[in-house]
Each structure stands twice: as structure tokens, then as C-alpha cells.
Image (cartoon, coloured by chain):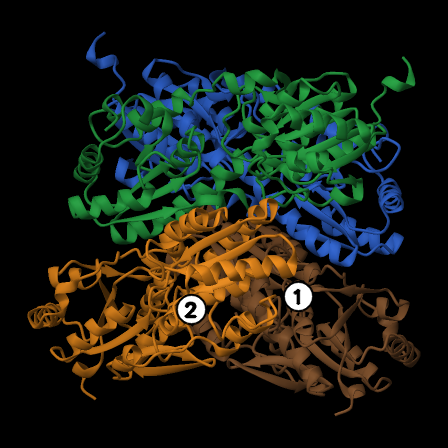
Chain colours: A orange, B green, C brown, D blue
Amino acid sequence: MSIATVTQRIGVITSGGDAPGMNAALRAVVLAAEHYGMEVVAFRHGYKGLLNNEHISLNAPDVLHILQYSGTIIKSARCPRFKEEESAKLAAKNLDALNIQGLVVIGGDGSFRGAHHLGKHWNGKIIGVPGTIDNDLYGTDATIGYSTAVAIAMDALDKIRDTADAMDRVFIVEVMGRHAGFIGLKSAMAAGAERMILPELQKDKPLTIAAIVKHIKRVEAVRGAGSYVMVLSEHQWPGGAVALSEQLEAEYSMPCRPCLLGHIQRGGPPTATDRVLASELGVHAVELIRDGVTGVMAGLRAGELVEVPLEETWTKKSPLDVNLLRIQHEIFNPVKKPARDEQE
Amino acid sequence: MSIATVTQRIGVITSGGDAPGMNAALRAVVLAAEHYGMEVVAFRHGYKGLLNNEHISLNAPDVLHILQYSGTIIKSARCPRFKEEESAKLAAKNLDALNIQGLVVIGGDGSFRGAHHLGKHWNGKIIGVPGTIDNDLYGTDATIGYSTAVAIAMDALDKIRDTADAMDRVFIVEVMGRHAGFIGLKSAMAAGAERMILPELQKDKPLTIAAIVKHIKRVEAVRGAGSYVMVLSEHQWPGGAVALSEQLEAEYSMPCRPCLLGHIQRGGPPTATDRVLASELGVHAVELIRDGVTGVMAGLRAGELVEVPLEETWTKKSPLDVNLLRIQHEIFNPVKKPARDEQE
Amino acid sequence: MSIATVTQRIGVITSGGDAPGMNAALRAVVLAAEHYGMEVVAFRHGYKGLLNNEHISLNAPDVLHILQYSGTIIKSARCPRFKEEESAKLAAKNLDALNIQGLVVIGGDGSFRGAHHLGKHWNGKIIGVPGTIDNDLYGTDATIGYSTAVAIAMDALDKIRDTADAMDRVFIVEVMGRHAGFIGLKSAMAAGAERMILPELQKDKPLTIAAIVKHIKRVEAVRGAGSYVMVLSEHQWPGGAVALSEQLEAEYSMPCRPCLLGHIQRGGPPTATDRVLASELGVHAVELIRDGVTGVMAGLRAGELVEVPLEETWTKKSPLDVNLLRIQHEIFNPVKKPARDEQE
Amino acid sequence: MSIATVTQRIGVITSGGDAPGMNAALRAVVLAAEHYGMEVVAFRHGYKGLLNNEHISLNAPDVLHILQYSGTIIKSARCPRFKEEESAKLAAKNLDALNIQGLVVIGGDGSFRGAHHLGKHWNGKIIGVPGTIDNDLYGTDATIGYSTAVAIAMDALDKIRDTADAMDRVFIVEVMGRHAGFIGLKSAMAAGAERMILPELQKDKPLTIAAIVKHIKRVEAVRGAGSYVMVLSEHQWPGGAVALSEQLEAEYSMPCRPCLLGHIQRGGPPTATDRVLASELGVHAVELIRDGVTGVMAGLRAGELVEVPLEETWTKKSPLDVNLLRIQHEIFNPVKKPARDEQE
């Protein structure tokens, strides 16, 4: 093996929406690279920085104590123009000019499309690390950031329950996940929410406001007066939680308050789950590059490290957990008739 | 002193919007009453329960370990019809029928108006305990619940900062306090927010969207690109944080994300400050009744227990802390020209 | 199928050391039982209450909003005398007298031994639900409570890092897990601790204080001065973290501070992971009883619900995750020579 | 006024044990200095760095987003040799060489003694900012860090209560404050602890183990079996919480578990109270220097900014809040005979 084939320098970016645990992944990449005698060059602001050649060198001391923080010390950005062929070529040129032999892309499906696109124009090794709160990448049991987002949504739901119980009121909490209901389902289950409005369920048979009201009344009838908490995934109701709660008040005289969590789901200390997952996948990514692998996402499935072709991560879909849906809709739902069949 | 004048039974309600620490106040009332040989009768659902005679007996074991929870175990409610004379008379009749000699009302200004109204028709002793997250009662340095609401808003702002810094973006966080900017000012200061839109400031000279944009750009110019976080009190912008962020995007191509905390500001474990304040004021309220005092709010000012005539608590106004405003607007605000003068 | 064979009433206990999520499991048992038309009888204080016939009826309203709290509303206890044959017979008699056809035992290995013992003398269906923070039960990827204990230990380690970094100091944090290093390993990894002293590692080759000092100095030499945080599983050093830190100061003039987390690892709001796991396993336990299964633990392995013979849960051992150990010892450990081989 | 008398450059150190909020104070110092056209030179590692001339320049961008973190970005240290005259002279020389006209010392009583000592040998302006979790400085209602330490101790006590209630057990939580019971008293009160062992109480009449046992039994008798949680200030029992719990088990067969919080009380996000206090006092310190004041601590008393001669801060003593002691001992303590008189 000639010395030239040994990977000596890898690049890394965090791209797209930031996710809690990205820093932990970055730390793992740098520490693993150091272990294998590689240098690490980070590009700030994701693909944008790759195009603008905004690069910095990262060493162990730079990353040792960043794993407890959300965000990303090398910043992230969205970069629509990276879809163009010229962009991929420019990125390849920049990478080659720096003598970089492998690139770790920490991000979600958009970032992986970018990685795949780049792979057509660059012959270095490219490995994706799944970093997105939405958990909507196929091939890994969880993405980095998902656990933290669920924890924050659950914490908000817990707080809402305190006041909902004190006032016997209806509340709607809008969570992230416009294309995937993972955050909505798991946080609703964890917090004992009475109702979920998720993209996967809305697609088949969208809820009407009348159905929601009917369900609220049934729950009230079965349990006696009490609190009723709904989890609404973003973009699943025109105008979101604010509009839905106004409709409930205006049309049904049902006092209701909205809460829009937004980006607080992306901050604060990442959960242990996210930090450990990020650590494992960051190391795995570096080891895959060292082994000459390219074009895959480093994932974890059923406790085993796996590699998933980048394209599969967005062309295939992970379904919501059927058992959780069943439990939430048929067992924990206190009304007599199973609400799931009719989505009401 | 005849035996008949000794207070033997007191009533207690939690009324209006619930506030973290109401349970701690309730616990203090019950434990203090037990200490002085009084019985405690609680009415559920505030004044509504007082009218409906929805009463329960409370003893030490019922309340020993409730101080770590928000909400109120005896529930709260709003009761607009309590303003009527008939209501006060009915309440007085119910209290007398139960041989109750004093009533502790834990709540905000609406609840204190109710207490004052009741006092015209009942000759028992009435003491208010300030329980509202808004901190908008005159005569006490802080109301029960305010500290916790600030803590939750600050925590949300901290989380937002993580993602705002990662993406160099503008965020708007809408907090409670439609009539008073206490939560907005303190949480903004604690979290290092770049901008506050508070009722007290809006009243004099409402901000225009152009002024906001100008300020964002000035901050960006002085600091270089970076995150910019705004704290918006509810009802201070038509359509709230959602509308304002849409306007910034639509009119100024400024990517901006909203967050509407809503009632999560009323849940979770109360802060130590709220629990200790609630404990002190709950005990003080019982001791005032024992001492024959009536028609006042039990408060804490400059470390001293005080009594404030109920009417003063809503007719007089506590101003925002002038020094905090000055620091936030003139010192911490990184732009050269003081933004305060022009509210821009 | 004759009506007599249909399970109509099940019992439930929480036993041994309490674990965060036990309430969520209890809630799931009650809601699932209600769904299948069964009644639930809970015995307070674990096996002790089963012997003393300390039973209460549990219905949906009793458990609807308990999943956000640690502890167990039906209390737990240790009961050494349950090992005796007479105890099992008495328990069987009490269960039969109440016409109970199935029993759900939520607890750890001691509780499962009790369940197995009971099974020899009672012909109702017995299902175990793994509730212990130690994660030391074979057959399930995680036990209920483990995730929360890790989260709390990690949070403590994060806080320690703040002050350790400010003072460039050595700290030792003692965590639970005298027989199993799961909490120690995962929290150390999540918090970026420099060193772990775990039962599984100590068994082979116990660390000497000289080896610890050598490692601290090597880390300091490689990194420059800085903080050094050790995670110590309980019972792995004579006198624990307090003694070890005193030794480091006395024998090596190395300023060092201990921290003994103890039972705070069992409190606070359970993580989403624990709540959802508890919900799934609680439902699964009831469905297993309904299906006539007995003598197994309801578990979750690689995302699938499984049933594990009770005896296997304590006779077989789950090893620590080899990849995590490797990463922590060989990759993240910043000293040149792999510290793992020599455990130094 | 000649231009030479205008303060143009100030120094700042964080000294002694770090306290949550020190970063917020540092930020305020830098932002206020910038506002008034001054430069800021920070010395790392407290007085040690002042002697070693370990200085760095601090500007607004360095400190903008540090207020949400505990610790201190300029590090702290203890420096016993600063008591010597030679040290003060060397420090004065170093300060003069850098043309520094004022020094802000953020720390506790030891740090203020150092400041006072320095003042005898240097004619620049010296202002102390009270940064210590112990709250043991006279002249300010609270020190920076105290609120956060109480919050963390309370959170630990809340968690302990969960498990204590589940098992009906006795727990001892050891908190910081060897010379002052502020943390112990406030956290005990906030968490509803049954017992406090504080320096101020121990000094008069130290508790015996027999008295503790008697009290535990009385509480149990009055309430029925239940949990019992003790807060123990460090250094108030030989061997601390570990030894006391062993004694209770060994001598009285009373199952008891210890918990030693240690330095976790100094980490995590500072409370809003600490951040706002630190912000106010940091600004005040700079403005005092600008106004030519020296030799005082910037404090906050009854909502007003104050200046306290440095010597007074350690020669005078702030007593524990008498009303809180009374409530905790006479009102909330559920046993009939007041436990306070006999400290039992």
C-alpha cells in the first residue's frame, strides 16, 4: 500500500437545520481522526462554507468539552445552490486543493442529497452522519437530535399538564416534524397526551374540527371534566396551533390555549442518548473513511453499527412505530370506541 | 376575650390563572392553621366553587409533599359572575353556613377584586396572597409564580440561542405578560436577548417593523453576523410572534422563526424563590387572620413581611426596574446610539 | 372457552428499589387492563403488602397523570422473608382469596426471584416487568429507570465539568451500580469523563491509586493542565469517592473533590425513553396474562417485544457494550498508549 | 479634569471558588467598560495570574454569550501566598506596568481580603463583586451563585423525596456551606425537608444522634410512616452524611442513605436571579471605578445598589433569616413540641 492511499486529512461539515448532538459527533470525528493520525479540516456554515472555502483546522483541545452543548461550533446553514453541478465541482476543487481525502457530512436528508451530489464530482470518500431532530432518515433506528427534541417536547407537555389540570382546560402544543410524526408520537406517548395530529395520520384522513370536538367531549364524558392535551405536528393544520385553538373557542366555545415550541426543540443540553449515539457514529464515520468506504450513512440499527447507501436514506421511509400507535389510540385512549379507525 | 372571637376555621381558594407556587402557599396555609389549632376548608375551582359550595377539608397529610409541583391541587377557575352583588352575598352565606371566620384568597388582581367585593358583604377576615406569574400587583416585591415563569422563559431563550448561534438567525420568543413587562424584561436580561417588546415601552411609542429591521442590521453591523433574539410580550404585536416573524421574512427577506411559550410558563417545579415566598406569605396570611386583620394582601417588600390594602394592589402600579431597563438598553445593547430614546 | 378461563382480575406490585418509570408502567397496566375488561388490584409495599394483604383497587382515573413522576404511588419495599416457602404460600392464598388470576411484578432481579418463587406455589399467571435503574437484567435492551439514572448522572457530571474547568481540578463522581457498570459507562461517555471505575473492569484487574495518578498526569501532560473527571461505580473503592479523593490529596498532593449522587439517581421526571418503555412493557405484560403466558419477563430487544423466562433474567448476564468501552478507552482517551490493556 | 485622570483601562479577575454567574458578571464588566470607552484586561486564574502576569484582553464579542454558563472563562484559583506583602507589591507593579487604573475582583471573602491587602500597596481603584455560592458576605442581600446553589440543592432534594416516599425511608443530603447555613436553610425550606443541621444551629447546641433519632420517631408517630429528609451542611458532622447515615443504621437499625452533592452545586446554567444580579453588579462595579470609588464591594440591598467597605463584608456577619427559621422549626415541623428550643 503506497503512502499516498492512506487517508491523512478529512473534512467535516454540519449542514442544514442544526440538531442537538452535532457537537458531540464533531468531537468524535476529531478525536477518532487524531487516534488514527489524520488531520481534520472543518468548513463553517455547511456547504456554503465548502463553496466559500471557509475552513479551519480542528484539534482535540478544540472539541474536548463541547459535547454537552447543542448547536454546532462550526455553524450550519442551508445552501440551495449546492444542487447545481457547478457547486459540486467547485466543492470538489476546494477539497482537492486542501488535499482532503474524505468528508464527513453531519446533517439530514437535504445534506445527504448534497453529499450524494458531491460524490458524482469528487472521488474522495464521503460518509453521512444522521443529524436531524426529525428522525426521518431511513436505515438508522434514530437520528442524532431526535431524543433531545422529544425530551424538550415532553417537558413542555408536562408543564402544560400542570396548568391544564389546574384549570380543566384544552391545550394544543405544536411540535416540529412537518413530514414525520416521530417527535409528535413519542412526546405525546411520554407525556400522556390525549390526542396527536401527525403527518402520517393526516395524509390518509385529515381530521375535521368537528371530529376533534367530538373526541374532546367523549373524553370528558368518560373521565369527567379534566384536562385535554393535543400534540400537533407543524404544518398539519392551516395556521397551526394558534388558528386551531381560536377555532375551538370561536366555533365551539371551548376555551383552548396554544403553544408553539418552535426551535426550542433544538437547544439545551443534548440527552445522553443523543450524545452517545453521536459519539458512536462520529467514530464509525472516520473508521469507514479509513477503510475506504464511501457513499453511505453511518447508522445504528438494533444496537449494531450499520452502513446505509446515502440514496436509501431518503428514498425509503421509516414508518411510525405501529405498536406505539396502537397503544396510544386503542389502549391509552380512554374513550370506548377505538378512535384510530376513524381518526377522530 | 370570649371563645367565640377565636378563629377556629378558615377557608382557602386558589383563583384566576394558576401560578407555580400556589400549592406551596396552600401547604403553608394548612400547616400554619394546624399549628394555631384552626381547621382548613378549601373550595375547589376558586370563586366558582365558593358559590357552588364545592368544599373539602384539608389537613397536613394532604399537603405535606405538594410544594414541588405547579398547578393547584384544589384547582382554579375564572368566575366573571362573581362581580355581581348576588354572588358575593351567596358566597358570604356559604362561608357563614360552614362557620368559617377567615378566608385566604390566593390569586392575582382579578381575584383580589373579588375578595374586596366579598368583603363588602361578609364580615369574616379576608387576606389575599399574591399568586400570579405576571408580577403585576402593587405592594410586594414579587408575586408567587413570577420567578418560575422567568426561569422557564429564560430556559427557552437559552435553547433558542443555541440554534440561533448555529444558524446566525433572528428569533422571536413570545412570553406572557400582556399588561406588564416583568417577565419579558427579566428573562431578556437573564438570557442576554438583544431586544424586548414590552407593554410599558409600546404604550409610549410603539415600534415599527422598519425600526426593528434597522436595529437588527445595526447589531449585525457592529458585531458581525450572528444571532439576534427578541422577547415579545403577548398582545404587543398584531398576530404575535408568528405574524411578526412572517412580516420580517416577507417584507425584509430576513429569515426569522417564532416561538410561543404560552402556558408552559406556568408549569414544572416552582423555583426555590417561589416556594419560599409562598411559604412565608401563606403563613403570614394565617397569622394576619389570627390577629384579626382583614382586607389586605400579605406581601414581602425589601425582605420584610408587609400588609397592603387590597385596593392598592391593583390601583397602584409597580413600574419596571429602571436600572434594568437602562442596562439592557444603554449598556448591553451593542449598538452605538442608545436604542432606548427612540425605542428603535 | 368457558367464562372461568377468562382473566378478570389481575394484581400488580412494585418491588425492591424504586425506579423512575414504575408509575408509567403501573399506569399502562391499569389502562390495558381496563381496555380488556379486567380489574386491577394493587398491593402496596411490594411483596410485604402481598403478605399483609395490603391491597387497593386501581382504576384509570387513579393513574392517568402519574407517568411524569418517579417513585411509585403504590410504594415499594424490600422483603427478605419472601424467600421462605411459607411466604409464597401465604401470598398464593391471599391472591386466590381475592380471585386474582394474574400478577404483574414490576422490579429488578430480586423481585423476579420472588416472582419465580411464588410461581412454584401459585397457579395464576406471573409476568415480570423490568424496573431497575441498574439495567442488570438479561433479555431486555434496557430496564425501566436506567435511562433516567444515566440522565441524572450525566447532568451531575456536566455541572462538575463547569467547576472542574474553572479550577483545573480532579473530581470523582460516585454513581449507582455496584454489580453492573451500565450507568457508569453510559454517563461517563455522555459527559466526556476521562476515567471510569466500573465493577466489570475492577473484577479483572483492580486499579491501584498509583495507576490512577499516573493516568491523571499523562492526561495533563498530553492536554496541558485542565480538568479530570472520574466516574466511580459504588462499592468499587473502599470508602468510595470520599476516601479515594482523600487519598489523592494526602498521598499525591492532588486537590480532588468527591461527589456521591446516591438516590438522586432515582428521582425527578423520568426520561421519555423510560416512560415509553414502561408504557409498552406494562401493556405487554397485561396482554401476556390475557394470552395465558406465565413465568416470563416482558422485555424489549432490538425494537421488538420479547418474553424472557424469569430465571434467565438473573442467571444470564448482559455484558457492557464492547464498542462503547473501546471508544472510551482507546479513542476518546487522550493519552497516547491505550489505557485499557493495563486498566491504568 | 485632565485626560490622565480618566480611567481608560481596567483589570478583572475571578478568584477563589468559582460561582455560577461569574461569567455573567464578567460579561457585564466588559460590556459596561466598552460603553464607557474603557479597555478590559483579564488576569486568568485569579491572584495567581495577577502575580504571573497571565493577562488577556477581553472585548464584547468574547463575552456576549457566556452568561448562560457556570464556571468562569478566565478561570479561577486559590492563591494563599497572596497574603504576603511581596505579593501585593508584585501585583501592583504588574497592574501599573499595564497602565491599569482600576481592578474588579469577583469572588468571596478570601478574595476580598486579597483586594483589601492589595489596596494598601496599589493606588488604583479596587471594587469587589460578591461571587460565592455561600452567601456569607455582609452588606448584600445575596451573593452571585447563591441562588443557583440553592436551586441545585432543592432539585436534588426533590429527587430524593420521590424515592424516599416510595420506600418510606430516611435520607441525608449534604450541601455546601461550612461556615454559613444559607444554602441549607433555603433549600430545606424550598424542598420541605424535615430537618436541617446548619453551622449556626450547631454552634450553640450540637445535635446528638439520639436527638435526631427521637425526632425521626416523633415525626413518624405524628404523620404515620413516611419519608424523612435531612439537610446537612458540610463539616457539621464528623464524617459527613456518609458517617451519619451509617451510624443511624448501625446504632438504631434505621435504614438511611446519604447523598453528597459537593461541587455539582456550582455548575449548570445559573438561575435568572444570579444572572441579573451579576449583570447589575458588574455594571455597578465599572461605574464605581469610573466615579473614582475604591475599596468597596458593589452590592444589592432591598432592591438598591449599594457600596460596602470591603472590610465590613467579612468582619460583619449576616444572620440567617429569623422568620424562615421560625417557620421551618415551629410551623412546618409537624411534631407537637417545638423542636427548635432544644435543637432536637
Residue found at x 59% / y 62%: C149
Q: Is residue C309 above or below residue D301?
A: below
Total numbered labels placed on residues in the image: 2
Chain letter for the residue marked with disc 2 in the picture = A
User: Which amino acid does the dot numbered 1 rest on?
Assistant: Arg
Q: Is residue B323 above or below residue C323?
A: above
Which residue is tagged 2? A182
Q: How crowded is the residue under tag 1: few (<14 C-alpha within 10 Å), some, or many (20+)? A: many
Q: Position of residue B107 (x, y in %)?
A: 60, 31
Asked whether residue C66 is in view, the answer is no
Q: How crowded is the residue under tag 2: few (<14 C-alpha within 10 Å), some, or many (20+)? A: many
Nearest the viewer among A292 and B78 is: B78
Q: Position of residue B341 (x, y in %)?
A: 25, 21
Q: CA distance from mark 2 to mark 1?
A: 22 Å
Which residue is tagged 1? C27
Find out whether the residues at labels 2 and 1 contact each other: C-beta distance under 8 Å: no
Secondary structure under the numbered disc 1 in the rendered image? helix
Nearest the viewer among C157 and C201 is: C157
Task: Find the residue positioned furthest to the left.
Answer: A86
Nearest the viewer among B277 and A171 is: A171
Secondary structure under the numbered disc 2 in the rendered image? helix
Chain letter for the residue marked with disc 1 in the picture = C
